[in-house]
Amino acid sequence: MKLSCELKLAGAWKKFKEVRRMLTIMYDNPGLTIFLAVCLIVMALCLLAAYAIYRLG
């Protein structure tokens, strides 16, 4: 039981380091962050439009 818990902790730490690295990359490249934010907004608008067309149609 203890071994599996330690493995989970190791996996979580690895994931945390990956997220931290991604955040560092975004902090160093504000253009990339803006690009990703715009992509998310456009995707949300497309989903809203698709849902509206589905509801109206």
Image (cartoon, grey):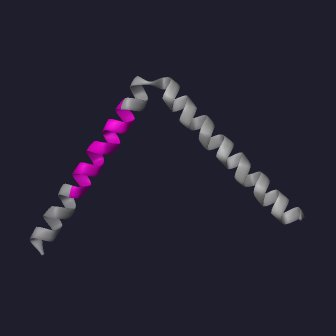
Q: Quadrant of residue 6?
A: bottom left
Residue that appears at 30% across and 44% down:
18
Judging depth in this view, the residue of 53 and 16 nearest the camera is: 53
Judged left or right of residue 41, residue 9 is left
Looking at the image, the residue that sits furthest to the right is 56
Q: Where, quadrant-wise, is the C terminus in this rendering?
A: bottom right
- The part of the chain drawn in magenta is 11-24
Residue that appears at 62% across and 35% down:
38
Residue that appears at 48% across and 24% down:
30
Looking at the image, the residue that sits furthest to the left is 3
Q: Is residue 10 above or below residue 19?
A: below
**Overall secondary structure of the magenta stretch?**
helix
Q: Where, quadrant-wise, is the N terminus in this rendering?
A: bottom left
Judged left or right of residue 16, residue 56 is right
Percent from the top left, x then y, of residue 56? Answer: 89, 63
Percent from the top left, x then y, of residue 45? Answer: 72, 46
